[in-house]
Image (spheres, helix red, strand yellow):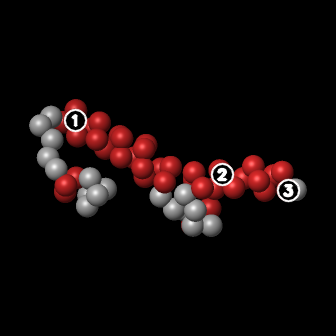
């Protein structure tokens, strides 16, 4: 987060910073980053594969 968000710009208010951090976490970090527990897939990719695996079983 430091390199990808905080070092790239400055914010006028703490509220703007808080909103930027929240958006970064909820819109990018949580749904799109790869997780080792999911076979190094993002949660979005993993969820896309799950219905196919369930239907095949």
Q: Name the quadrant of the C terminus.
A: bottom right
Residue indicated by mark 3: 56
**Residue 38: x %, y % from top left:** 62, 62
> Residue 9's x, y, as percent?
16, 50
In contact (CB < 8 Å): disc 3 and disc 1 = no
Residue at numbered disc 2: 48
First in sequence: mark 2 or mark 3? Answer: 2
Instruction: Tell me the mark number nearer the camera, choosing from 3 and 1.
Output: 3
Q: Give coordinates of residue 42: x percent, y percent.
A: 55, 57
Question: Disc 1 or 2, which lies upstream in sequence?
Answer: 1
User: Could you tell me which quadrant the N terminus lies in?
Assistant: bottom left
At mark 2, the secondary structure is helix
Q: Residue at x 22, y 52 (%)?
A: 6
Q: Secondary structure at mark 1?
A: helix
* Residue wearing tag 1: 16
Left-right relation of 40 to 11: right
């Amino acid at each position: 987060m430091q390199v990808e968000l905080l070092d790239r710009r400055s914010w006028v208010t703490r509220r703007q910073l808080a909103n930027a951090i929240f958006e970064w976490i909820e819109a990018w970090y949580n749904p799109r980053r790869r997780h080792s527990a999911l076979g190094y897939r993002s949660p979005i990719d993993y969820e896309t594969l799950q219905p196919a695996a369930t239907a095949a079983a």
